[in-house]
Image (cartoon, grey):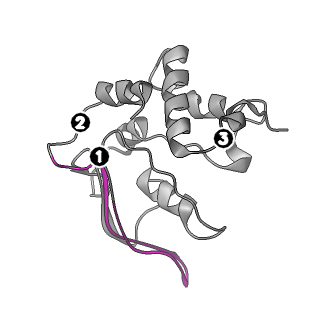
């Protein structure tokens, strides 16, 4: 794993030994009659970088919105750092300070590069120094396999 990405991961509380950083169990979500997520099981270990790829409408954004507690689950559970975050009484604000996501298309800042959009959360919310955030995001970007030229392209 990239050293910059590891450095950020080590600053955050780690899950219990043997416990994945993020774990989804039987996650199910539908919108009316449209079943979008059907029994998703997933485990992501601390320091891993995960890329979710699929065709339009396949549930990628819905999955991320569920993990960030922006969409309620129909059934199943989501655990973060060993704690079930989908249980009743969860401090949603606290969870969202620890789980970041960059929205696609319309919610990005059009005058910023992809890299600048990715580091906005760590710099603004977590008060991470900009140079450290850039190193972390660059490491994650490289691990994802996406071309690095995309980090310097401005939208609009």
Q: Position of residue 15 (x, y in %)?
A: 21, 41
Residue 115 in the image: state x and y as whole percent.
Answer: 63, 31
Residue wearing tag 3: 147
Q: For mark 3, does the 10 Å Cα neighbourhood hold few (<14), some (14 to 19), or many (20 or more) residues?
A: few
Q: Residues within 10 Å of mark 1 (few under 14, many from 20)?
A: many
Q: Are marks 1 and 3 in contact (CB under 8 Å)?
A: no
Percent across and percent down for residue 124 are: 53, 23
Left or right: 47 as drawn, with respect to 127 = left
Q: Where's residue 74, x and y in %?
A: 40, 72
Q: Which residues are drawn in magenta?
A: 18-42
Residue 123 visible in the shown view: no
Query: Would you say 127 lies left or right of 78 here?
Result: right
Q: Which mark is residue 21?
A: 1
Residue shown at the point (15%, 43%) measured from the top left: 16
* Tags 1 and 2 touching, CB below 8 Å: yes
As drawn, 73 above or below 22: below
- Residue 19 within the magenta-colored segment of the rendering: yes
Residue pointed to by mark 2: 14
> Would you say 89 lies left or right of 98 here?
left
Element assignment for label 1: loop
| N-terminal label among 2 and 3 | 2
The N terminus lies in quadrant? top left
* Callout in the foreground (2, 3): 3
The label on residue 98 is none
């Amino acid at each position: 794993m990239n050293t910059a990405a590891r450095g950020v991961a080590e600053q955050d509380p780690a899950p219990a030994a043997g416990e994945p950083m993020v774990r989804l169990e039987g996650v199910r979500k539908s919108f009316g009659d449209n079943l979008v997520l059907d029994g998703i099981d997933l485990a992501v270990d601390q320091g891993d970088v995960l890329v979710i790829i699929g065709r339009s409408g396949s549930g990628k954004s819905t999955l991320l919105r569920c993990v960030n507690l922006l969409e309620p689950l129909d059934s199943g559970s989501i655990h973060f750092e060993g704690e079930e975050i989908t249980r009743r009484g969860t401090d949603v604000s606290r969870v969202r300070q620890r789980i970041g996501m960059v929205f696609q298309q319309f919610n990005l800042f059009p005058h910023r590069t992809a890299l600048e959009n990715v580091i906005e959360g760590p710099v603004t919310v977590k008060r991470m120094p900009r140079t450290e955030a850039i190193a972390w995001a660059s490491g994650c970007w490289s691990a994802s396999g996406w071309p690095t030229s995309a980090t310097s392209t401005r939208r609009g």
